[in-house]
Image (cartoon, rainbow, N blue to C red):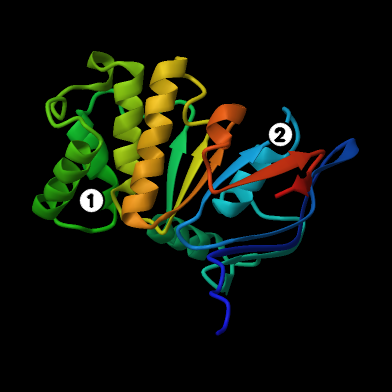
């Protein structure tokens, strides 16, 4: 039986920044991630975690090497092609929720769906179901300023899932929360991963949370040192 094609594959992926001196933020990274996997990326500050996340999230381009997403080489895509793939296949949860402060939780989740061209009625139905799924059925009409940090992060999770992305990227999604709330958000991500069979890639400094992932990827000085 042939092995299932990885949803993400890095082949000698390298990112070099030049600012007077050359800095290899990512150094010949090789990695395969399967569909439905929950992967944690750990490493000290400056090890290349965010750079790796930005490469996979199509927010930056590599200096050399190859990046395949769902079997497609995205390394030399145009900005328009990258944007289209990002909107279609990727969801993002950041350390700070980045919600629109003048909009309700429901409106924040609806927004990406409207941008994709989904009707207002269908978008509202999808958003309501997602907010119920993350436990905010009684907070849909509240604005970010009226919600706790954990509740805002739940809205951000619902927004990330709104367009049914194949891959969800979390860059320190619990880093701005207290330990108890962070644990609850991480467990929420893990549950959604299992229920929806979406691929989750989470950068975290929390070794305890990372240990609950299917696999831990360790980075040191831009190099993947352990899987």
Answer few, some or many: residues within 10 Å of disc 1's Cα (few below 14, many 20 plus, some between 14 and 19): some
Q: Name the residue under label 2.
A: 43
Q: Which residue is located at x 22 percent, y 30 percent?
A: 105
Circle 1 sits in a helix, a strand or a loop, which is it?
helix
Report which quarter residue 185 is drawn in: top left
The label number, if any, that marks residue 9 in the structure image: none
Q: Is residue 97 above or below residue 118?
A: above
Relative to 124, 220 lies left or right = right
Q: In this view, does 88 lie above or below 170?
A: below
* Residue 89 is at least partly visible in this image: yes
Q: Position of residue 35 (x, y in %)?
A: 48, 62
Relative to 212, 139 lies left or right = left
Q: Mark 1 points at which residue?
A: 114
Report which quarter residue 190 is drawn in: top left
Q: Where is residue 74 in the image (x, y as percent from the top left)?
A: 59, 66
Relative to 160, 131 lies left or right = left
Which circle's residue, 1 or 2, is located before the other in the chain? 2
Q: Position of residue 197 (x, y in %)?
A: 38, 57
Circle 2 sits in a helix, a strand or a loop, which is it?
loop
Q: Which residue reaches farthest right?
A: 21
Relative to 103, 172 lies left or right = right
Q: Which residue reaches farthest left?
A: 121
**Mark 1 or 2, which is nearer the eye?**
2
């Amino acid at each position: 039986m042939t092995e299932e094609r990885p949803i993400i594959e890095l082949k000698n992926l390298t990112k070099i920044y030049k600012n007077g001196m050359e800095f290899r933020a990512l150094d010949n990274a090789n990695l395969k991630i399967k569909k439905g996997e929950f992967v944690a990326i750990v490493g000290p500050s400056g090890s290349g975690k965010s750079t790796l996340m930005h490469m996979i999230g199509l927010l930056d381009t590599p200096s050399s090497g190859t990046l395949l997403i769902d079997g497609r080489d995205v390394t030399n895509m145009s900005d328009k092609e990258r944007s289209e793939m990002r909107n279609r296949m990727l969801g993002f949860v950041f350390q700070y929720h980045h919600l629109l402060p003048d909009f309700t939780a429901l409106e924040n989740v609806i927004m990406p769906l409207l941008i994709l061209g989904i009707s207002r009625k269908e978008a509202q139905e999808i958003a309501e179901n997602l907010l119920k799924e993350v436990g905010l059925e009684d907070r849909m009409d509240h604005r970010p300023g009226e919600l706790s940090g954990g509740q805002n992060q739940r809205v951000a999770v619902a927004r990330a899932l709104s367009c049914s992305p194949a891959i969800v990227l979390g860059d320190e999604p619990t880093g701005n929360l207290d330990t108890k709330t962070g644990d609850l958000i991480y467990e929420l991500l893990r549950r959604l991963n299992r229920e929806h069979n979406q691929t989750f890639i989470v950068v975290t400094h929390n070794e305890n949370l990372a240990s609950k992932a299917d696999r831990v990827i360790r980075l040191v000085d831009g190099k993947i040192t352990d899987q």
